Image (tube, coloured by chain):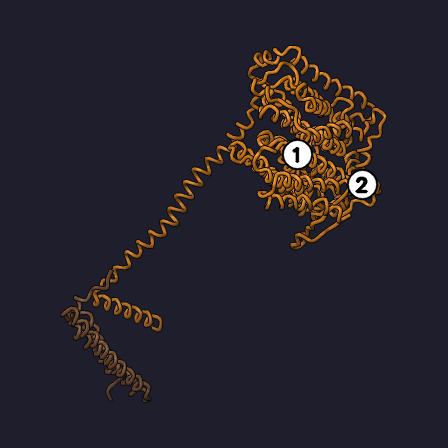
Chain colours: A orange, B brown
């Protein structure tokens, strides 16, 4: 088994190295063969490991294997070790399958772009880092993966590095997530200080044995700090600003990194640390509230966006908020379930948009699209399937996962009704803006430029096949967990019970809650269906039946509309609050004043001048006049003699 | 017996005269003679002490001083001759090239 895991993780690293170092001389076919082959191998071995582990009893898990000791410093010991349990199984399978499909898609998408080998190299490297993140057995190794995916994100967002906006977006992503990472690091340090170890297994064992009244404060602090890292990485309030800008990267990047995998790392972190959070319900409440607010906030912005990818970016932020809501109320398994279904349908949405983008020669403004459903049937149908999934329409995967979260928001261990209502409202918004996109892009009269319309064509099989496969998963994955109110047993959640069950128990016990548990299940489901249905209807009304309405509403509520389109001016606010002061301070104070004047002027120049000045004074002794030299000698001798006499006298 | 302090006083007077001449005289040869005067003043002091302590250490040192003075005088005069050939002058104020 240990070889299996290694075989899963190493091919992407090898692929990245091969393509990175030698790729320049390779043909496109060879580069993509290495890239897709590496990710394919990773997928095969991940599936193999899953196949072996699936029937195993939960007592034999987690499977932990250490390959070598990485850090040994005093009492701190971190190994390069894999931690494989059912959660890891779900994560590795999801990550590798989606990654492989996206690698395949990239073969077609990136065919005419420059830097083909660089792209696949970075993509493979990312996969390796992500796998390291989810299989790590301790927090430092997980952080290695965490930073690694951040690096690859930076490299891939700024892939078109000659374009200033892309380079800036890459920097923005890295710097903003860095703020979160600071919280993560402090949290890990605090964790080590409290627990004495950073190994998952050791920590999880010790947590339950520590006296709660002494340690709860520490646990809460750790929980919040770790969540800060998640806020950055998973683009929650207030550190979400990098994700919309990240759309500057090629579409497969948006699909893989900023929809399916990297941004879910934060959710994985919280889920993996569920036991810790179970002992710190206050921190968990923060998680839930932030998640819910983010979900709603981002959805409101998505409603007014006209750029297809940007809207999807806000949608991702919103859906990630849902996952954090799930963790925040204590139904961790539902959050992971949504993570999985979301990975499928969101990456599908991005890939399909890429297909549209390619067909339209790079156009992303939905106002310039329309009537594409006949010209691009595969793209249309897969996009529609994904939209149905994300809107929570019954029968598609999103319905099952989202409803589990909503049910948990209401009746879960830390569930609150207001969380449920806000989340349901957001679900309505989600359905609305997604169908708005569908109607604007694929239906209605064509608003395309004539030359663009000429070239519209369905994408080739290289791009179409992954779309179809992802659409398949977007439908099927939901059936892994048939909801209880409809008579099912939520198999997915049951499967993950050994991972989360203990935490959920603790939360249920620790927090006495009046909210209804069993009875309301069906009613909740009805409400969410109503919300989704309403959203779809409004979208239909606005964009198909009476297309004049949106503009009229925008006119009447001009101010409000403008706020939404400009994303609540958050970027401008940050620019005013942080960027300008830092830039100004750096320029005026640190550069001009300190660097230029103080260091260059006083220290470097000044020292030189001082030496010259002193020398100028001292050299006058060398007058060439021998008699004055003699006088100096005599004077020195006399002084010395006086000193001696003084000392001995 | 002549007290030691007399000898030492004489030695000091000779030495100070030598220093004064060294500083204030302009002719190089005169300056050299003053140097010799200083050396001899020191010799006098050594001998006086030797007599006073009743051992030969002072006289031994005086021998060293005489030898060194002789060698130094020889070399110094040679240098002065070379200098004179260059500057045609024995005035110490004319030799001031090595300055800032």
* Occupied quadrant, residue A345: top right
Instruction: Give the number of the disc on residue B4.
Output: none
Q: Is residue A146 visible?
A: no
Query: Picture coordinates of residue A126 (x, y %)?
Result: 64, 40
* Occupied quadrant, residue A435: top right
Residue depicted at x 80% and y 44%: A61
* Chain letter for mark 2: A
* Occupied quadrant, residue A324: top right
Residue A22 as seen in the image, left or right of residue A323? left
Q: Is residue B47 visible?
A: yes
Q: Nearer the viewer, residue A455 or A5?
A: A455
Residue depicted at x 61% and y 15%: A446
Of labels 2 and 1, earlier in sequence is 2
- In the image, is residue A39 above or below residue A555? below
Residue depicted at x 71% and y 25%: A382
- In the image, is residue B33 above or below residue A290? below
Check the picture and name the quadrant holding the C terminus of chain A: bottom left
Query: Picture coordinates of residue A310 (x, y %)?
Result: 60, 26
Residue depicted at x 72% and y 19%: A532
* Chain letter for mark 1: A
Query: Picture coordinates of residue A63 (x, y %)?
Result: 78, 46
Query: Picture coordinates of residue B42 (x, y %)?
Result: 26, 80
Residue matched to label 1: A256
- In space, the residues marked 2 and 1 are separated at their CA atoms by 24 Å
Same subunit, labels 2 and 1: the answer reads yes
Dot 1 crowding, Cα within 10 Å, few <14, some 14–19, many 20+: many
Q: Nearer the viewer, residue A203 or A300?
A: A300
Residue A648 as seen in the image, left or right of residue A336? left
Dot 2 crowding, Cα within 10 Å, few <14, some 14–19, many 20+: few
Residue matched to label 2: A51
- Assess whether mark 1 and mark 2 are in contact (beta carbons under 8 angstroms): no
* Mark 1 secondary-structure assignment: helix
């Amino acid at each position: 088994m240990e070889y299996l895991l290694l075989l899963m993780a190493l091919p992407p690293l090898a692929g990245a190295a091969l393509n990175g170092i030698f790729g320049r001389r390779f043909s496109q076919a060879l580069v993509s063969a290495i890239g897709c082959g590496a990710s394919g191998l990773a997928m095969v071995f991940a599936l193999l490991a899953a196949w072996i582990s699936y029937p195993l009893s939960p007592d034999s898990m987690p499977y932990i294997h250490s390959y070598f000791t990485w850090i040994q410093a005093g009492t701190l010991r971190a190994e390069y070790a894999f931690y494989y349990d059912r959660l890891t199984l779900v994560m590795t399978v999801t990550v590798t399958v989606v990654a492989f499909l996206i690698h395949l898609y990239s073969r077609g998408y990136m065919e005419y772009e420059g830097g083909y080998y660089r792209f696949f190299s970075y993509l493979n490297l990312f996969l390796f880092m992500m796998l390291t993140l989810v299989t790590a057995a301790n927090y430092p190794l997980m952080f290695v993966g965490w930073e690694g995916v951040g690096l690859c994100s930076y490299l891939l967002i700024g892939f078109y590095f000659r374009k200033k906006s892309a380079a800036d977006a890459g920097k923005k992503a890295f710097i903003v997530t860095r703020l979160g990472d600071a919280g993560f690091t402090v949290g890990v340090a605090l964790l080590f200080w409290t627990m004495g170890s950073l190994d998952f297994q050791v920590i999880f064992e010790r947590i339950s044995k520590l006296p709660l009244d002494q340690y709860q404060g520490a646990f809460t602090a750790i929980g919040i700090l770790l969540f800060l890292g998640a806020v950055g990485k998973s683009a929650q309030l207030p550190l979400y600003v990098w994700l919309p800008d990240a759309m500057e990267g090629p579409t497969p990047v948006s699909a893989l990194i900023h929809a399916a995998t990297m941004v879910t790392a934060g959710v994985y972190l919280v889920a993996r640390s569920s036991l810790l959070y179970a002992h710190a319900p206050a921190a968990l409440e923060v998680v839930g509230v932030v998640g819910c607010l983010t979900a709603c906030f981002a959805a409101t912005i998505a409603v007014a966006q006209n750029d297809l990818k940007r809207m999807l970016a806000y949608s991702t932020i919103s859906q990630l908020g849902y996952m954090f809501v799930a963790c925040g109320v204590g139904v961790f398994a539902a959050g992971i379930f949504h993570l999985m279904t979301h990975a499928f349908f969101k990456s599908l949405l991005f890939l399909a948009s890429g297909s549209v983008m390619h067909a339209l020669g790079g156009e992303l403004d939905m106002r310039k699209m329309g009537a594409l459903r006949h010209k691009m049937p595969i793209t249309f149908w897969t996009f529609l399937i994904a939209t149905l999934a994300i809107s929570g329409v019954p029968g598609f995967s999103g319905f099952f996962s989202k409803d589990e979260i909503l049910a948990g928001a209401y009746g879960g261990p830390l569930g609150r009704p207001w969380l449920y209502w806000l989340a349901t409202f957001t679900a309505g918004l989600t359905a609305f803006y997604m169908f708005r996109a569908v109607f604007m892009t694929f239906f209605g009269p064509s608003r395309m430029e004539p030359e663009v319309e000429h070239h519209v064509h369905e994408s080739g099989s290289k791009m179409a096949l992954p779309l179809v496969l992802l659409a398949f998963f977007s439908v099927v994955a939901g059936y892994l967990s048939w909801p209880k109110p409809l008579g099912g047993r939520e198999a997915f959640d049951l499967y993950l019970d050994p991972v989360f069950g203990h935490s959920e128990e603790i939360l249920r016990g620790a927090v006495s809650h009046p909210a209804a548990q069993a009875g309301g299940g069906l009613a909740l489901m009805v409400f969410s269906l109503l919300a989704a249905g309403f959203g779809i209807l409004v979208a239909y009304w606005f964009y198909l039946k009476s297309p004049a309405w949106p503009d009229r509403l925008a006119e009447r509520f001009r101010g409000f509309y403008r706020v939404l389109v400009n994303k609540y001016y958050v970027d401008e606010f940050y620019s005013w609050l942080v960027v300008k002061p830092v830039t100004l301070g750096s320029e005026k104070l640190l550069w001009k004043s300190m660097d230029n004047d103080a260091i260059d002027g006083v220290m470097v120049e000044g020292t030189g001048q001082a030496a010259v000045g002193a020398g100028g004074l001292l050299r006058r002794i060398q007058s060439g006049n021998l008699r004055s030299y003699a006088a100096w000698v005599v004077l020195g001798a006399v002084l010395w003699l006086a000193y001696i006499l003084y000392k001995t006298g | 017996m002549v007290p030691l302090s007399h000898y030492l006083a004489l030695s000091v007077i000779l030495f100070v005269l030598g220093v004064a001449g060294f500083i204030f005289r302009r002719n190089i040869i005169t300056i050299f003679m003053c140097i010799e005067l200083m050396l001899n003043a020191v010799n006098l002091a050594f001998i006086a002490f030797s007599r006073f302590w009743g051992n030969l250490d002072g006289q031994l040192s005086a021998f060293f001083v005489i030898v060194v003075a002789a060698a130094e005088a020889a070399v110094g005069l040679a240098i002065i001759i070379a200098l004179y050939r260059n500057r045609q002058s024995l005035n110490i104020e004319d030799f001031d090239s090595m300055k800032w």
